[in-house]
Image: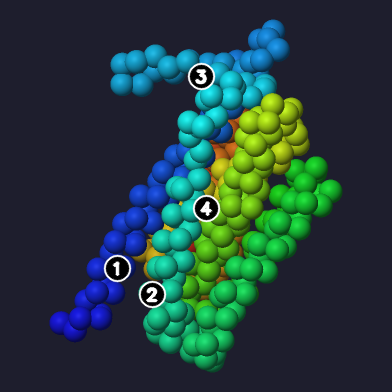
Amino acid sequence: MEFIPYTLKWLELVLRWGHVLFAILWVGNSFLFNYLDNKLNKDISSQDIDGEGYLMHSGYYYKLTRLKNSPPVQYLSNLVIFKWQSYLTFITGILLLIIIYFYNSGVLMIDKRVLQISPLYAILISIASLLVSWFIYDLLCKSKLINNNFLFSLIIFILLIAISFIFTKIYSPKFAFLSVGLIIGTNMFGNVFTVIIPNQMNIINSSKRNEKFDLSLSLAAKQRSIHNNYSTFLVLFIMLSGHYSFIVYHKYNWLILSLVALISVAARHYFNLRGRNIHRLYILISSILSLIVLAVLLLIFKN
């Protein structure tokens, strides 16, 4: 076996392994903290405590307290900041994109039955789509639309349908799906890297100077974190979709992906509401039934 191909195989294996591990940690953190925020008892008459709750794990009780103000300065140097899960998920993902797809772009990215395109153009379109999509998403988040959840979500969904359709007319079906996942994952990473972590560092620096921190920084970081939370189910579906050719290579694969996006967001919304003790079981049942109907339709309308 030649040295370089053999080395690349091992590099791919290690990167895939790491990518999945880091993604599990990132998604787990997202679910945990969103659940804790929803479950904390906020009916507390205290100037310092914003909410508190109790957990049990491995036979021990844990008390959780969310503070309105910063903790004593001596504790700030030992703060645990959850960022490397996101960073390493993105880094390993980009490296996999380069060594697997960009390196073999003529085979894995291009399908001549879809579009005659050179490997270089295919790569440039992929890179440009990541940058442009982040610019548009970030612009929408900084606009007044962010104050209207329904309108903002509707625009994001329309854009998702558009990019899903466009990619299926440019790339091979498998890479088209992957490209949608890359855009969502990049936006999720961008939320962490450009908003959540910088805002948290500004808050920490204000606390170290004994200054009252800007609450709008916390609200903006939390908002982007919620966006990431709603994106997780769809990203995981896309990660697995490459194993299911009857979906990826279906004539209406872009529409299937768009419908799964809607179903996954609805299911995630149910669990987020449930964390706040708001029980809307019909949302979960509707999501499950919609998935079943989609499966039946795929069986009826085969390629």
The residues tagged by marks 4 and 3 sit, at their Cα atoms, a distance apart of 30 Å
> Between disc 3 and disc 1, whose residue precedes?
1
Report the amino acid beneath label 4.
Leu
> Which color mode does the image show?
rainbow
Residue 201 seen in this snapshot: yes
Tell me if mark 4 has few (under 14), some (14-19) or many (20+) residues whose alpha carbon lies within 10 angstroms of its own.
many
84 or 148, which lies in front?
A: 84
Name the residue carrying label 4: 234
Q: Are marks 2 and 1 in contact (CB under 8 Å)?
A: yes
Helix, strand or loop status at disc 2: helix
Q: Residue furthest top?
A: 45
Report the amino acid beneath label 2.
Ile
> Between disc 4 and disc 1, whose residue precedes?
1
24 or 273, which lies in front?
A: 24
Q: Is residue 166 above or below residue 133?
A: below
> Between disc 2 and disc 4, whose residue precedes?
2
Residue at horizontal 67 percent and vertical 22 percent from the top = 69
Name the residue carrying label 2: 99
The residues tagged by marks 3 and 2 sit, at their Cα atoms, a distance apart of 43 Å
Which mark is on residue 11? 1
Q: Which picture quadrant has residue 283?
A: top right
